[in-house]
Structure formats: C-alpha cells, structure tokens
Image: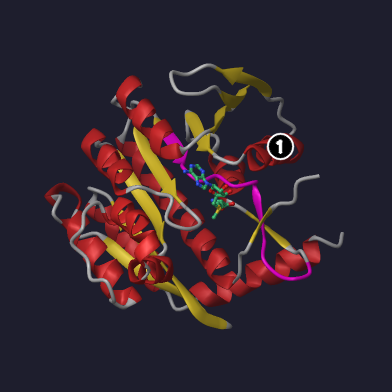
C-alpha cells in the first residue's frame, strides 16, 4: 500500500498553519467582495497527509485543510499530483476522510493520457499530471472571472516560473508559494542542475554561488517587477530542530488588506509554537 508523502518536519507544519490561517482571511475577504466564485488550486497536492517524523506520524496536508474547512466557500477544487501512487493515495484519503465518492478515469490528451478523480459535491478534480501543464490549460480554457487561491507546494524545483507568470497574467489570483531556497542554492552551484534553477527563476540572471537568502530575494525582485502584485511578501521557514534546510513562503496578491493580513500571519510570534502543537496533537491523534 502506498505510504503518505514523507519528509516533513516543523517547517511543514508552520507552512500549513500559514496556509490555513490565510484561507480564513481569503474566504472572509473574497466571499464578501467577489461574486463570481472562488476556486482553490493546489499544484502539488501530495497524498493528503505528510509523515513528519521517524515514527511515521502524519499531519493533515493542504488539500484536507482546504476541503475540511472551506468547502462552503470554494465553488471548485483543482488538485494536481504528478505521481500516480500519490494521486491514488490522495483520492482514497479524501474519500475516507470526508465520505466522498470519486469517479476515477483516464482522460486522453494530446501528449499523453492522464488520470482524473472526480467528485461533484463538493466539486473536486484531482488530475494526475504535471501541474505546470495543468495550470496553463486551466487558465487558458476556463472562465476568467472566478477568483483563484493558488497554493504551490513543490518538493524540489518542480514549479516553473512560467506557471507563476501564467497565473499572474490570468489575474484574479492570490498565490502562496513554498520556495525551495536551500534547494535552489544547492542546484545553482551544480552544473548538472542549472536547468532546473533556470526553470524556477525564469531566466539566467542569478549568481552561481549565492546564499539561500540571495536567491529568495532575487526571486521576490523578479516577481515585484509585476507592479500589480507588489510588494511580494516572503517569510523564511527554518525548523528550530534542523537548520540545514530553508524554505521561504512567497505570497503575492493585489489586495492590500489581504497582504497586510498575510504579513501578520507570517510575522506572528506564535507560528512555531502552533507548528509544534500541531505536530504534538497529530502524534496523539495517530494512536486513537
Ligand atoms: C511537498 S509535497 C505536497 C504536499 C501537500 N501540498 C500537502 O500539504 O500535503 C509535493 C508533491 O508534489 C508532487 N509533484 C512533484 N512534481 C509535480 C508536478 N510537476 N506537478 C504536480 N505534482 C508534482 C510530488 O509527487 C509530491 O507528492
């Protein structure tokens, strides 16, 4: 049986606290001011849960959080997952958790067939495909007036800058991205992985031996060139118990009120306390 996605730690929990607290703000602000529908887009949806320690303890992931608390607000959920095993684990996990039924089928496309798991109430489409392709297709072929919350949570350098540009060009979108700062730094230093850095940064204008901080600031500056969504916010995430790897949350939106709220979420004193509580609680929950 496929295991849940593995490799999380406190920064995974801190990321998910920020994701959930921002969804509260987003659904409150947008529900009042946007009358043509809200869509939730999760480009790297995972398996539904993440294993966060060596004992196999799990915490609920982004898709569960969004569906559990906000299915009354979002008209549609689009979840993308490239791995076939993770795709199946995800629809099975959501079906168990929320007592949903998914119709799973193969859809032909120009390049290759892909799997879809579809549920109509709430409207959820899980697509087993590269989200860089999926998001481009969705932006091109769907109505332009729903407002999107796009959560981009890759492992490694699998989120292309061109996908972000597609989202920004479409407009009507708030974006929360988990930027792989240490991963970019390490890849930039190695000749064989520079293509991945180029795809992530969107161009070749970056140092070959920068610090994690330099790469994320440069990425922020590149996004800030789009004046409609600036200033882009960033927040470094480094686990108190493992400082070797750094992520940065990157947030872009047009609305000043929403941006201020996200700034408060990112800079709150209690983020790590909440993250470790979440891990502690999930630990107990796994044994009952
Ligand atoms: C960090 S995990 C996602 C965790 C999830 N957001 C959560 O909170 O539970 C990253 C996932 O992205 C998937 N993935 C990797 N490259 C992808 C791509 N190009 N498109 C869609 N999914 C991808 C991986 O298989 C993995 O399951």
Look at 39% across and 60% down and name the residue there: 193
Query: Residue 247: where, in percent of width, then height?
Result: 43, 68
| The quadrant where residue 7 appears | bottom right
| The quadrant where residue 162 appears | top left
Q: Is residue 121 visible?
A: no
Look at 71% across and 29% down and name the residue there: 100
**Quarter of the figure that contains the C terminus:** bottom right
Work out which residue is located at the far right of the displayed protein and give it: 288
Question: How many neighbours does mark 1 have within 10 angstroms: few (below 14), some (14-19), or many (20 or more)?
Answer: few
Query: Residue 55: where, in percent of width, then height?
Result: 79, 69
Look at 31% across and 33% down and name the residue there: 34
Q: Nearer the viewer, residue 132 or 43?
A: 132
State how the image is colored.
Answer: secondary structure
Q: Is residue 18 visible?
A: yes
Work out which residue is located at the far front of the displayed protein and give it: 192
Query: Residue 141: where, in percent of width, then height?
Result: 34, 20
Q: In the rendered view, does 189 fall on the left or right side of 48?
A: left
Q: In the rendered view, does 114 fall on the left or right side of 248?
A: right
**Quarter of the figure that contains the N terminus:** top right
Q: Is residue 248 magenta?
A: no
- The span shown in magenta is 39-55
| The quadrant where residue 186 appears | bottom left
Q: Nearer the viewer, residue 287 or 264?
A: 287
State whether label 1 is within 8 Å of ligand 1: no
Q: Badge 1 is on which residue?
A: 98
Q: In the rendered view, does 93 fall on the left or right side of 216?
A: right
Q: Is residue 50 magenta?
A: yes
Query: Residue 264: where, in percent of width, then height?
Result: 36, 67
Find numbered disc 1 in the image and state the secondary structure of the residue it sits on. Answer: helix
Q: In the rendered view, does 30 fall on the left or right side of 41?
A: left
């Amino acid at each position: 049986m496929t295991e849940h996605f593995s490799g999380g730690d406190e920064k995974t929990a801190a990321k998910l606290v920020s994701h959930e607290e921002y969804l509260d703000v987003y659904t409150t602000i947008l529900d009042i001011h946007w009358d043509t529908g809200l869509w939730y887009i999760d480009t790297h949806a995972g398996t539904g849960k993440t294993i966060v320690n060596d004992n196999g303890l799990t915490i609920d992931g982004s898709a569960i959080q969004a569906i559990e608390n906000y299915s009354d607000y979002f008209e549609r959920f689009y979840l993308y997952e490239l791995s076939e095993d993770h795709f199946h684990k995800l629809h099975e996990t959501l079906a168990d958790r929320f007592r949903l039924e998914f119709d799973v089928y193969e859809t032909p496309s120009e390049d290759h067939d892909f799997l879809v798991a579809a549920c109509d109430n709430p409207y959820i489409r899980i697509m087993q495909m590269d989200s860089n392709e999926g998001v481009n297709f969705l932006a091109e072929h769907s109505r332009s007036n729903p407002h999107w919350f796009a959560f981009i949570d890759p492992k490694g350098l699998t989120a292309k800058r061109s996908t972000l540009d597609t989202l920004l060009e479409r407009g009507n979108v708030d974006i929360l991205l988990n930027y792989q700062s240490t991963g970019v730094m390490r890849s930039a230093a190695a000749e064989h992985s520079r293509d991945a850095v180029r795809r992530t940064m969107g161009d070749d204008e970056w140092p070959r031996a920068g610090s994690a901080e330099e790469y994320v600031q440069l990425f922020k500056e590149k996004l800030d060139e789009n004046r409609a969504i600036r200033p882009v916010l960033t927040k470094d995430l480094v686990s108190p118990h493992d400082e070797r790897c750094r992520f940065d949350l990157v947030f872009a939106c047009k609305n000043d009120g929403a941006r201020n709220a996200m700034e408060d979420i990112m800079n709150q004193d209690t983020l790590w306390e909440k993250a470790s509580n979440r891990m502690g609680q999930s630990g107990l929950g796994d044994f009952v």
